Image (tube, grey):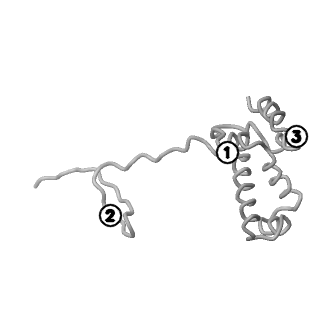
Amino acid sequence: MITVTKPIHFAVKGHRKRAVNGPKPKPVEPAGRIPRISKLMALAIRFDKLLEDGVVADQTELARLAHVTQPRMTQIMNLLHLAPDIQEDILYLPPVTAGRDPIAERHLRPISKIVEWRRQRRAWASISR
């Protein structure tokens, strides 16, 4: 009698569980987590699209649907007052691997109140380093 030892693992392919030859693939470890401010910026853009398309009537209705207060919704939507390149920088911030996020939404509140984009960019450069 001959015994053959071969590594196999079970994987779901389609809707069935099947035996697959070879060792089990190593799980991909996440490089970090997406910064909260990046998520908020994406939400603000999505919410603005919903308002523009008429899916929701106003920010108050949007706040109710999102289960946040109306002032919090205003804080999130104020991120849209930032210069487009700053918004892009926020969306593409590197993942956070340990500790707290380097930039919080409260750091951007005074910047979003600045009307001139040139001054916004200077303020953004001072906190994004």
Residue holding disc 2:
18
Quadrant of image for the N terminus: bottom left
Residue holding disc 1:
91
Q: Residue at x 74, y 60 (%)?
A: 47
Left or right? Give the position of 91 relative to 77. left
Q: Amino acid at mark 3?
A: Ile
104 in relation to 21, above or below:
above
105 in relation to 121, above or below:
below
- The 10 Å Cα crowd at callout 3, few under 14, some 14 to 19, many 20 or more, is some
Residue 35 rendering spot, x and y as whole percentages = 69, 44
Residue 36 rendering spot, x and y as whole percentages = 72, 47
User: Which type of secondary structure does the marked residue at label 3 adopt?
Assistant: loop
Q: Amino acid at mark 1?
A: Leu
* Residue 114 circle label: 3
Q: Residue at x 55, y 44 (%)?
A: 30
Mark 1 vs 2, N-terminal side:
2
Q: Residue at x 81, y 54 (%)?
A: 77
- The 10 Å Cα crowd at callout 1, few under 14, some 14 to 19, many 20 or more, is some
How far apart, in angstroms, are the residues tagged by discs 2 and 3? 59 Å
CB atoms of marks 1 and 2 within 8 Å? no
